Image: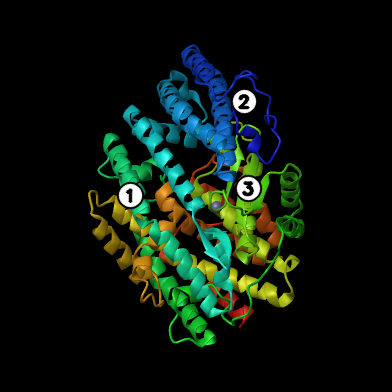
Amino acid sequence: MLAGMNLLPFEPQPPFRPRAFVPEKTDLGDWSQIEPLFDKLESAAAPARAPAELERWLLDGSELTAALDEEFTRRHIAMTCHTDNAGAETAYLRFIEEIEPRAKPRQFKLARLFLEHPARAGLSQERYFVFDRSAQAQADIFRPENVPLETEEARLSQQYQKLMGSLTVKFQGEEKTLVQMGRYQEEPDRALRQEAWELTTRRRLQEADRFEELFEQMLKLREQIAANAGFPNYLQYTFKARGRFDYTPEDCRKFHKAIESEVMPVLRGLQARRREKLGLKTLRPWDLSVDPSNLPPLRPFDDVEVLSARAQEIFNKLDAGLAGDFRLMREKNLLDLANRKGKAPGGYQSTLAESRLPFIFMNAVGMQRDVETILHEAGHAFHALAAREKDLYAYRSAPIEFCEVASMSMELLGNEFIETFYSTDDARRARRKHLEGIVDIFPWIATVDAFQHWIYSHPGHARGERRLAWLELMDRFGGDVDWSGHEQARALLWHRQLHIFLHPFYYVEYGIAQLGALQVWRNAKKDKAHALQAYHRALALGGSRPLPKLFEAADCRFDFSRQTVKPLVRLVQNELAVLGE
Ligand SMILES: [Zn+2]
C-alpha cells in the first residue's frame, strides 16, 4: 500500500460484484502484478469461439479495466484533496507514469483482438452497437508513439492544477485562495469588490507567462498526437477521440451563431437592467456578480454540514429514489465539500469504477453557487448509481453531452425546492441568479469552444495571434462590459478556464446538455413524476445507447440548432419575468 492512500475521505469500499477474474490480492499499483492479467486475456481471446464465450471474455476485460480505473481514481482523489501532500502526489504521478502508459497499449491490443474476433459478428447488434463503434474508433486513432506524449500531457495538467491551487493573496490581513476570493464579487461595497477583483486578477497575471508556456507545451503535444494519428489537426482528431459520432465541428460553429443571435440580446438586456438598477454609467468586470438591487450576497450556509443536510432535504422533496442515493453518499463519506488551501480548484464528481460508487469534490465557501454545484455534482452521482447494474464497464458511463444533462437538470429541478436554504424572497433571488447564470454561460461556452476551434485549426500560430483570436470572441460574446484599464486581464481571461488546459474541447458539451436540461425542466413543469421517470430511465441506460437515443429516453431532442435554442431561451426569459424584480 502506497503512502498517501490513507488520505481518502472515505473507507475502502468492496467491489460491487465479487471479482471473477482479477485476484483479490493484486496490487494495482504494481505493473508486474497487472501484466500477467493482460497476458491471460490475450491468450484467452482466440479459444473463445461462441459469442457467449466472447462475452465472458469481454466481462473479464471489463473487470480489469474497472479495477485499474478505481485505483487511478482513488489516487486522483487523494491528490486533489491534498495538492500539498508529497506522498499523494507521488502515488498519483507513479500511476500515470508507470501504469497507464503500459496499460494503454495492452488495452488497445484487446480492442484489436475483439475487432478481429470471428465471434464478434454473432454478438447482439442491439447490445453491442455502441461498444463496437467505440472500440473501432479507439483502434483507429491509437498510436503507440502517442502514449508517452499523453503521459507528458497528464503531467502538465497536474502542474496546471498545482499552480492554480497554490495561488493566494493577502486580503484584509489574511492569506486567501483565489477560490475564497470569489465570494467578495457578491459584496454590495463596490470599492471592496474592485479591490478584491484587482488583487485576484493581478495575482493570476503575475503567472501569465507560466500559464502561456504551460499551454504552449500542451498545444505542441496535442498537435503531435493528432499528426501521429494521421489527422490534419487536433480538432479533427478530437472529434474522433471524444467519440463525437453524432455531430460535427460545423454543427458547433452553427451553435455558436445560434447563441450569438438568440442569447446575446437577452444577455445584453440583463446587463442593461443590472447597470440601471445599480445606477452605474458602465458595468465593470467587478459589477457582474453582485445582486442587481445591491443586496448583500445570499449566504445559504456557513458550514458544509449544513450544505449537505439541506441538499438532502431538497432530494427528499424531489424523489424518494434520489434521496436514498444521496443519503448513501453522506453515510459513506463520499463527499469532500469544504474549500481549504492545498485543494485543487473546482468541483468534480468521479466514480469508483469497481465499487461503483460516486464521489463528490467541491470547494464550497458558502455561496449560492455552491448550492448549484452540489445539485449539479449530485446529478452526476445519481447517474453513476443509476447505471450501476450495467455489467460492461464501458456502459456504466454515458457520453459527456448526456452526463451533463443528468447534472444540469438536477440544478433546475432542485432549485424548485431551494426554500430549504432560504426565505421566500431569497429563494426568488437564488432562482433568478441561477437562470441569469444560464443566460451568461451560453456565450461563455461559445467563447471557450470557438477559441479552441481557432487554436487547434491554426497550428503554429503565434502568441499574439492567439490573443487577437480571443479578443475577437470577447467582442462577439462578452456583452457590454467596460474593461478599460484592464485590457491585459481581458486578453488573458482564458487562463482561468481549466478545461482549456486540462480537457481540450470539453466545454461545448455543457451547452448541448443545458439544452437537454432545459427540456427536462420544461417537462417537469408539466408533469413532475413523468419527467423524473424519464430522467431516471435515461440515466439507467448509462452509455449503452447513442446520444440521440439517450436524449430521447429522457423525453428530449438531441439538437442544438437555432430552432431548439430559441424557444428554450424564451422559456428562461419568461421565467425570469415571472420571478420579477
Ligand atoms: Zn458536470
Note whether ligand 1 is within 8 Å of mark 2: no
CB under 8 Å between callouts 2 and 3? no
Q: Quadrant of residue 294?
A: bottom right
Query: Which residue does the numbered mark 3 point to in the structure image?
Result: 360
Instruction: Describe the element under mark 3 as helix, strand or loop.
Output: strand
Callout 3: 10 Å neighbours few (<14), some, many (20+)? Answer: many
- What residue is rendered at 29% in x and 61% in y? 467
Q: Quadrant of residue 540?
A: top right
Q: Within 10 angstroms of label 2, few (less than 14), some, or many (20 or more) residues?
A: few
Quadrant assignment, res 145: top left
Residue 14 at least partly seen: yes
Residue kind at label 1, given as amino acid type: Glu
Name the residue beneath numbered marker 2. Answer: 1
Near-viewer residue (88 or 548) = 88
Tell whether 28 sits left or right of 427.
left
Amino acid type of disc 2? Met
Q: Are marks 1 and 2 in contact (CB under 8 Å)?
A: no
Label number found at residue 213: 1
Q: What residue is drawn where x is 40% and y is 78%?
A: 480
From this view, report whether residue 33 is shown above or below residue 467.
above
Label 1 sits on a secondary structure element that is: helix
